[in-house]
Image: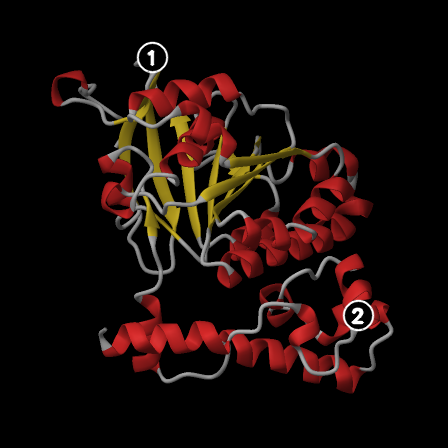
Amino acid sequence: MSEEHEENEELKKSRLEYLEDLPGIGPATAQKLKELGFHTVESLAMATVRELEPAGISEKKAAAIISAARASIGVTFVRADELLKMRQNVLRLTTGSKAVDRLLGGGLETQTITEFYGEYGSGKSQICHQLCVNVQLPPEKGGLEGAALYIDTENTFRTERIVQMAKHIGLNPEEVVRNIIYAEAYTSDHQMFLLENADEVIKENNVKLIIVDSLTAHFRSEYIGREMLASRQQRLNKHMHKLIRLARAFNAVAVVTNQVMAKPDMFFGDPISPVGGHIVGHTSHTRVYLRKTAHGPVRIARLVSSPYLPEGEEIFKITENGIEDVAEEEKPKSSGR
């Protein structure tokens, strides 16, 4: 057994499995924490002291509990060289298109949020469906050998599409569908509630992909008018920070889709911009703008922002098989680049 493997085994042994294992948490406190949406040690490690106050826990005790949870899963200050080693734990998930994977530096990263935005029909939900299938592939094929959690706010999820995609890449459609945990969110409050209570489901089902499709639809329809903008942005901020905490705690890929709005007063550049303003922009680590072309199934993916990747764009196509590369002979003479 290698030294690195032994270290990993020791780390697993030192991890506390249940809330009651943490010092200062008895059955009654554990129940109150679960009612607040903290079902696992991982979710507690990413909590703030203020978030535990409704459970009737003092500030001092809350800080001690969170500290113990963080110590259990190894959340602490580290040197940059140690961080480099930890970054090796970051995994990548294929989109199904080598061109788009290349644009994203090898695929979608775990522990971060990737945002796909674009107009209706640009392929946002199609990519989400494909990712639900691809995440179940083995690592050597670009997958994460895990399940998917899909929060649907616009009733766009279709199991028939999943079956089509699964058959094309040689997976058992029944097994693939079984490994997708689905929930339809009816309001923005319901959407937030689902995510806030997802930690146990994620842990028990080895979820490696968390999708919110679409992130902003309910918020946009419920918070109307300038006077409600601040309230909407605060709740969106809380929602997205919960998502990134889950992605980090469980080393999962987080994906959100976003609607767009037109800016008629913009005379230069693209008048289309994503909903959610700076809150969504700052919290999404990687933003990809999808748009249609005049060439039927062909789409353009533009990397708009990334912590370390350069801007750029690639073309791909959406077919019955799913997300695919465009063959050289199929490529339009001008892809808009």
Task: Give the x, y percent position of residue 34.
Answer: 75, 60
Question: In the rendered view, would you say 151 is above or below 172?
Answer: below
Q: Residue at x 64, y 50 (%)?
A: 198
Colouring method of the image:
secondary structure
Tell me the distance, in whole angstroms, between the alpha carbons under discs 1 and 2: 58 Å
Q: Quadrant of residue 63?
A: bottom right
Disc 1 to disc 2: CB gap under 8 Å: no
Task: Give the x, y percent position of residue 46.
Answer: 60, 68
Residue topped by disc 2: 27
- Judge left or right: residue 278 versus residue 291: right
Sooner in the amino-acid sequence: mark 1 or mark 2: 2
Q: Nearer the viewer, residue 122 or 139?
A: 139
| Dot 2 alpha-carbon crowd within 10 angstroms: few under 14, some 14 to 19, many 20 or more | few
Amino acid on which disc 2 is placed = Pro
Q: Closer to the camera: disc 1 or disc 2? A: 2
Q: Residue at x 25, y 32 (%)?
A: 337
Task: Give the x, y percent position of residue 328.
Answer: 13, 23
Q: Quadrant of residue 309?
A: bottom left
Q: Nearer the viewer, residue 147 or 312?
A: 147
Residue topped by disc 1: 296
Amino acid on which disc 1 is placed = Gly
- Judge left or right: residue 233 versus residue 332: right
- Judge left or right: residue 111 versus residue 314: right
Question: In the rendered view, would you say 320 is above or below 284?
Answer: above
Task: Give the x, y percent position of residue 163.
Answer: 43, 20
- Specify the farthest residue to the left: 329
Q: Name the element at disc 1.
A: loop
